[in-house]
Every structure is written in structure tokens, then in C-alpha cells.
Image (spheres, grey):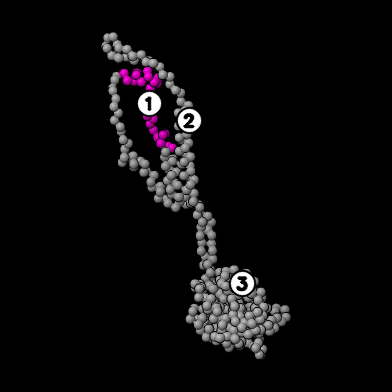
């Protein structure tokens, strides 16, 4: 679409006429000798009348007016508006805390075919699909065992987060569970976030065996920072030992941070949890639109220049092709009766 950045420039269209009215051309006073036969002298000396009558009408003003109009068009700065370019701005930062301790090796999950699988494999299968549905969010990934580690910083590249999650293995961060420290690392990552919504989803069995900060205390700090934590309990409540499920700790973390607690005994329940999270954490996409502008002012400016050059070229060619009058000697004599000078061509 064609538009003008400065349409007010066309208000200057009558400016030459106003200048002509306010500042009329200067008329020079020529010193001359008036004689009754001056025209005959000019004809005799030049072969044709030297003083031609000025051409009247609007013809000679057409090209200057066109040049002035084109210059005003360039001053108005015509621009071509391209199609709008839209970009989604993230409105939420979502951090996933994935437990990689030895307890995640426990095979107490069942897939759709009824085959048992370990807890981490079930998390990878379901969380990967959940990530790809979070368009409009910035997603980060923290894995933890004996200590938490940042696997993927906040990014809108959801496929990258999914790939880094798929590359994780049980025990790569240590055999024990440090859920409280992982929450503390997540809180620190949100310090540089200016997103209006901040959410942590912790996937673990909740059996904290290595944290320096109690998980419930870390949850209270998160709430003070405006961060909501949803906890997802992974595993079988009947499991004992270090692989047992500490549901009470996960409930306290969710409650202290203003989040929700979910329990997943199998993959089907885990998929349902993420559907519920999609409902709770509604996606809000902020779209920023921009239309690129391409300046076109140089086209009318170029047209004005070419028009001026063309006019000047035509004038030069006409002057070169004009015939040169033959100069004939003039005979001047004194009339015998009246005594006046006469010029004979």
C-alpha cells in the first residue's frame, strides 16, 4: 500500500505564485535613443526583427509546474507499506524441574499397552508433547540429583528443550534427590525474567535426600517472588526405601507456593495432569505487529531531474538548428527634401 509520510508538503503547491505576487520581477531601465525609424534599422542590420513579441499563455509554464509538483511529491516522502510482520512475545516463563536421581529408574509406570517402563522414560514421553504445545511461552529445563544443573535456559525454541530432555539419563546428576536446591536454582533463574507469569513444574518422587534448603521453605520463597510451583508426584505410593514417593513434601511445596499438587501413577494419568496444567496455566500470546516501510521519494526526484534535463536539451538543440540570418549592409542616406535619415535594406 502506498502512503505519504509528510502529506502536508502539498500545501506548498501555491508557493511560487505567492512569491511572484509578493516579490515581483525587477524591471531594469534601459538607456535608449528613440527614433521613428528604429524598426527599419533593426530589420536592415539583422535581416529579421530582433525583438519578438513575448509568447503568452500557460504553455511555457507547464514543465516548471510539473517539476515543482514532482519536487513536492518527493518532499512528501512516499512510502510503500509491506505486509505486516507479526512476532509473538512470551507472556510466561515456564521452568521444568526433572528429577534424575536413582529413584527415577524404578519401573512402576505402565504405557498404553500395559508394559512397564521406568519413571524417567514416562516423563520424557509425555513432557515432550507438553513442551511442543507451549507456543508463546519461554521454557527452561533444570535437572537435579545430588545437585541441580541448568540443562536449558529460558528459550522459545521448544524443540531444543525437548531434545535436551531426551538426552538426559538417570543418575547423570547424582543418585540422590535435591528438590529444595533445584527450586532455589529456579528462583535465581527467574531474577532476570520480566515475564508477567512465572511458573515451575517439578517432576519428582519428592523424596528429598540431599537438599540444603527444605523444599517447603523454598516454596515459600518462590511465592514471595511471584513464582507458582506445580508439583507432579512420579511413582507408586507402595514403593519403599529411597525410591518411595514422598507425597506429603510435594503437597507442602505446592501449597506454600500457591500452586497445585498432582499424582501420576501411570502414563495415562500423567497425560491427564498436563491437560489439567494446560487449563490452569492458560496460554496468553502477545502479538507485536510491524509493517516495513520502503522509501520511494527518489523516484519523483529522479523524474523531476530528467524532466529538467530534457527541457534544457530541447532548448539547446533548437538553438543549434536555428538558421543564422544573413547580414546585409545597410545604406543610409539623407532625404533631400525633409532632411531625415533613411535606411535602405
For this rendering, which residue is in front, 172 or 304?
172
Residue 52: mark: 1
Q: Is residue 32 visible?
A: yes
Residue 145's tag is none
Query: Horizontal placement of 9 versus 335: left or right?
Result: right
- Are the residues flagged by discs 3 and 1 in contact, CB closer than 8 Å? no
Q: Name the residue under label 3.
A: 161
Q: Residue at x 40, y 47 (%)?
A: 10
Vertically, is 121 above or below 13? below
* Res. 267 in view: no
Q: Which badge, 3 or 1, is on the more N-terminal residue?
A: 1
Q: Quadrant of residue 149?
A: bottom right
Q: Is mark 1 on a helix, strand or loop?
A: loop
Highlighted range, magenta: 37-63
Distance from disc 1 to disc 2, alpha carbons, whole Å, reads 20 Å
Q: Is residue 317 above or below residue 215?
A: above
What element does badge 2 sit on? helix
**Is 205 displayed left or right of 338 in the figure?**
right
Looking at the image, which is closer to me, 288 or 150? 150
Mark 2 burial class by Cα count in 10 Å: few <14, some 14-19, many 20+: few
Q: Does the magenta stretch include residue 53?
A: yes
Relative vertical location of residue 155 with respect to residue 312 in this rendering, above or below:
below
Which corner quadrant holds the C terminus? top left
Kindly indicate the quadrant of the structure image that contains residue 56.
top left
Instruction: Give coordinates of residue 292: x percent, y percent.
Output: 51, 56
Asked if the stretch drawn in magenta spans residue 67, the answer is no
Q: In which quarter of the image is residue 50?
A: top left
Amino acid at each position: 500500500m502506498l502512503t505519504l509520510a509528510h502529506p502536508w508538503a502539498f500545501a506548498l503547491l501555491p508557493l511560487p505564485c505567492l512569491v511572484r505576487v509578493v516579490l515581483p520581477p525587477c524591471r531594469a531601465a534601459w538607456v535608449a535613443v528613440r527614433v521613428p525609424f528604429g524598426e527599419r534599422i533593426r530589420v536592415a542590420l539583422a535581416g529579421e526583427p530582433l525583438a519578438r513579441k513575448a509568447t503568452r499563455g500557460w504553455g511555457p509554464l507547464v514543465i516548471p509546474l510539473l517539476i515543482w509538483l514532482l519536487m513536492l511529491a518527493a518532499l512528501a516522502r512516499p512510502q510503500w507499506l509491506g505486509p505486516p510482520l507479526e512476532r509473538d512475545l512470551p507472556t510466561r516463563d515456564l521452568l521444568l524441574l526433572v528429577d534424575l536421581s536413582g529413584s527415577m529408574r524404578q519401573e512402576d509406570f505402565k504405557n498404553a499397552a500395559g508394559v512397564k517402563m521406568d519413571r524417567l522414560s514416562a516423563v520424557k514421553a509425555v513432557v515432550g508433547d507438553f513442551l511442543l504445545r507451549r507456543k508463546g511461552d519461554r521454557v527452561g529445563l533444570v535437572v537435579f540429583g545430588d545437585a541441580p544443573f541448568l540443562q536449558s535456559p529460558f528459550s522459545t525454541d521448544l524443540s531444543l528443550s525437548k531434545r535436551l530432555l531426551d538426552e538426559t539419563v538417570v543418575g547423570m546428576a547424582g543418585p540422590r534427590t535435591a528438590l529444595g536446591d533445584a527450586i532455589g536454582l529456579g528462583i535465581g533463574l527467574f531474577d532476570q525474567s520480566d515475564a508477567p507469569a512465572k511458573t515451575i513444574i517439578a517432576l519428582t518422587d519428592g523424596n528429598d535426600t540431599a537438599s540444603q534448603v527444605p523444599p517447603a521453605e523454598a516454596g515459600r520463597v518462590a511465592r514471595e517472588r511471584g513464582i507458582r510451583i506445580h508439583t507432579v508426584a512420579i511413582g507408586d505410593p507402595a514403593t519403599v526405601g529411597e525410591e518411595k514417593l514422598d507425597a506429603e513434601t510435594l503437597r507442602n511445596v505446592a501449597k506454600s507456593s500457591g500452586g497445585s499438587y498432582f499424582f501420576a501413577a501411570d502414563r495415562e494419568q500423567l497425560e491427564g495432569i498436563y491437560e489439567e496444567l494446560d487449563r490452569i496455566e492458560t496460554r496468553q500470546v502477545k502479538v507485536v505487529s510491524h509493517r516495513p516501510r520502503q522509501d520511494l521519494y527518489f523516484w519523483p526526484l529522479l523524474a523531476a531531474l530528467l524532466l529538467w534535463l530534457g527541457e534544457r536539451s530541447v532548448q539547446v538543440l533548437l538553438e543549434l538548428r536555428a538558421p543564422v540570418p544573413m547580414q546585409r549592409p545597410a545604406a543610409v542616406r539623407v532625404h533631400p527634401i525633409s532632411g531625415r535619415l533613411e535606411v535602405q535594406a
